[in-house]
Image (spheres, rainbow, N blue to C red):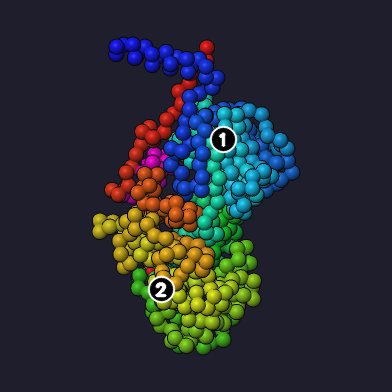
Amino acid sequence: MKSFYIALILNVLLMLNVSCEKKYPPTDMARHALIPKPVSVEATHETFVLKDKASVFYDSGNEALKKEAEYLAALLGKATGFDIKVKASSALPSRGNIFLTTSMDDDSLEHEDGYKLEIDRRYVKISAPQPKGVFYGIQTLRQLFPAEFEKENKDVKEEWFLPAGTIHDWPEYPYRGAMLDVSRHFFGVETVKRFIDYLAMYKMNILHLHLSDDQGWRIEIESWPNLTKHGGSTEVGGGPGGFFTKDEFREIVAYASERYITIVPEIDMPGHTNAALASYPELNCDGKAPELYTGTRVGFSTLCTHKEIVYQFVDDVVSEISELSPGPWFHIGGDESHSTKHDDYVRFVNRVRKIVKSYGKKIIGWDEIAHADIDSEDVVQFWAREKNALLGVKKGAKVIMSPSKHAYMDMKYDSTTVLGLKWAGYTEVDDGYSWDPATLVEGIERSHILGIEAPLWSETIETLEDIEYMIFPRLPGYAEIGWTSSKHRSWDEYKIRLGKQKQRFEAMGINYYPSSLVPWQNEEDIFIEPIEKDNN
Ligand code: TNX
């Protein structure tokens, strides 16, 4: 009896194989661990095979899209070793190719930053209303390849498989960011670019750079050259510090913008200004320049808010930085000004706000700025005090959610973490993920929220490896909070997808924290690599 059943099963399998015209057995798109989780994934259980002859086609005449095609071809070429060509086309190209288009035939994709990714046996097609959406589709496509795609694989395989199906996707919030503090410790252009790559991979679109603080001034200002010459010459612990020249800053802005990431420059004031005060005595009330500072205390410095020269200084700085940053925002800091009298603080922020607006920028400030005369054009970044954020909302301002208890990537994971601080509490990977921006603070609702941002302060962070350890694996979670609607999110489901990133992180050489809360898994256990079959 048993052998009868075995024979029957074998026969059925044989028939399936014979009648099946597909060369490759099915894969399952829905089993792929995408982060951030897309709005919808429909698997069709077929396989697209990428081979050496493949090209990336884009709508003829669309130069912005051509750039995306070149970006994708370079990504594919680096990963596979294939010589992938870029070609213009006005129709769906022939079998085996990839097509990028901004002509949409699908009303279900109303969101301006959305995309549709279709993979079938014959082709891969990414369509979106804007090139930005195509870029997001490319990031999703990237995650559908096996983890080894993230290595440089010159000539290791002749075929790369992609699971077939259709993904519709768009973001929940327009502002999905991270902050890097380049003041407490300085990080150069290459490290910042790497940070940008990580944001781009998870469809984040904001990099907030904390460019000045007590310990260092990090951006060249031609009209006040001593800011970087003296104020940029050290950092926490007394190291050499550093700063971005204007050209270097332009290079960062351009690199970010190719990845649809906006740089939000921050000059923190009136507190957190020791580096500036040490560089120019006239910014101090007593006219004396303090020593440079290499410790980690906060709240001891302030610009002299009564002096006219201070506003000339602010005007020059805002003017020079605004010229370098095409984004709509200028971050004025405004936090922890414990050495500034309340009335002076309010008057200072009111004046600085006008200066910033005169250069065509909108202000963002830490939640304390809600005490100034702000309105619906301004943005309050909630980090510490709910009361401040609520005051901002009452005045009509929008809110960026950066609650220190959940979103501070410089907080230690637990008591054994060597790097980082713990003043806001330990932030394990689940604490980082399990919160909803729209319900966290009573009175701050979805409609008040511009988005979320996860800051990385760098008092204890000195190298790229340190950065990676603190942001991985929390960063993908913040990206998902910003991108994926909270009704489609749960830690229990997310942690499985996160666990499947193990080999991807390893392929990229990322120094990540292997949290015991995450079920880390090797890809072989989850990715069914199609086996080539004979079609006779
Ligand atoms: C608070 S968050 C600060 C920073 C520190 C950070 C360390 C904020 C607006 N101010 O000056 O670097 O804590 O976690």
Foreground residue among 314 and 246: 314
Where is 347 relative to 465, above or below? below
Q: How many numbered dots are placed on residues in this image? A: 2
Report the residue marked by disc 1.
119
Residue 435 seen by the camera: yes
Region of the chain picked out in magenta, as a range = 499-515
Q: Residue at left 45%, top 23%? A: 531
Q: Residue at left 41%, top 69%? A: 441
**Circle 1: element type:** strand
Q: Residue at left 54%, top 75%? A: 396
On residue 386, the disc is 2
Tell me if residue 158 is in the magenta stretch.
no
Dot 2 or dot 1: first in sequence order is: 1
Spatial separation of the CA atoms under disc 2 and disc 1? 46 Å
Tell me where residue 172 appears, x and y as whole percent.
52, 56
Q: Residue at left 33%, top 11%? A: 4
Tell me where residue 439 appears, x and y as whole percent.
42, 65
**Amino acid type for the residue under numbered disc 2:** Glu
Where is 82 relative to 518, above or below? above
Where is 193 relative to 391, above or below? above
**Amino acid type for the residue under numbered disc 1:** Ile
